[in-house]
Amino acid sequence: YDTKRNKSFLIRDRIGIAPLFYCQDDGVVYFASEIKSILATGSVSAKLNMDAFFDFIHLWSALAPETLFAGINQVSPGCYIEIDHNGVTEKRYWDFDFDPADEQILDDAIDELDQLLSDAVKIRLRADVPVAAYLSGGLDSTIILSYLTRQGADLETFSLTFDDEQLNEESFQSEVVKHFSTRHHSFCANYQL
């Protein structure tokens, strides 16, 4: 809280590792590092934010400043919010700085990325239980699955499908399953608004 400017600041780390949530209710701003703390205030109910849910299904995350809960926002990574008598304003204080002069030779960058992905997948295969993978049919899950099979993982894959053709990616999922010959399980997730 800045007493001279009569403002409060909520600041999130640059990359967004630590969560920071808030909601506004009748001139009061509640904030916490966990949504359940905000729900405990009783100022907002645990109602699903459908727009954020659609993002979650496709991207595995609600896009900041949205959350899966209607009325609860998150401070975006590399941003802060100012709270004063005018309300809440989000401002960016940091972003990635990319200088093309620092660019690695493409082949070196590809080799480094390949090694990093291979190592990341190998670490996650260390488990006392069978390993499974979620398969959306998109690039991310398909690339991860290619590294898993390259490492010799014998795994099952799981997918969600939808009756709504705008959301359904079953054809892409089927193509990937056929290519990698996984033991696949598909579940239809229908919803009612």
Image (spheres, grey):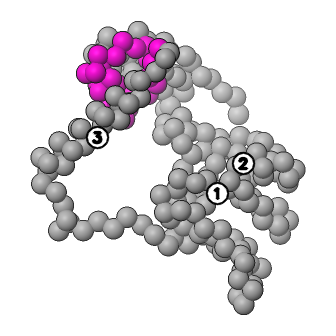
List x then y, in percent, for residue 193: 70, 34
| Residue sticking out furthest to the bottom | 4
Q: Is residue 86 visible?
A: no
- Mark before the other along the chain sequence, 1 or 3: 1
When asked about the image quadrant of residue 135, the answer is top left
Give the residue drawn at x 54%, y 34%: 57
The amino acid at mark 1 is: Leu
Distance between the alpha carbons at the discs numbered 1 and 3: 29 Å
Residue 145 painted magenta: yes
Residue 25 painted magenta: no
Give the residue drawn at x 83%, y 69%: 27
The mark found on residue 35 in the picture is 2
Could you say whether the residue bearing mark 2 is in a helix, strand or loop? Answer: helix
Seen from the viewer's position, the closer of residues 180 and 153 is 153
Callout 3: 10 Å neighbours few (<14), some, many (20+)?
few
List x then y, in percent, for residue 70: 72, 48
Q: Which residue is mark 1?
A: 20
Q: Which residue is mark 3?
A: 116
The amino acid at mark 2 is: Ile
Could you say whether the residue bearing mark 3 is in a helix, strand or loop? Answer: helix
- Mark before the other along the chain sequence, 1 or 2: 1
Could you say whether the residue bearing mark 1 is in a helix, strand or loop? Answer: loop
Distance between the alpha carbons at the discs numbered 2 and 3: 33 Å
When asked about the image quadrant of residue 192, the answer is top right
Callout 1: 10 Å neighbours few (<14), some, many (20+)?
many
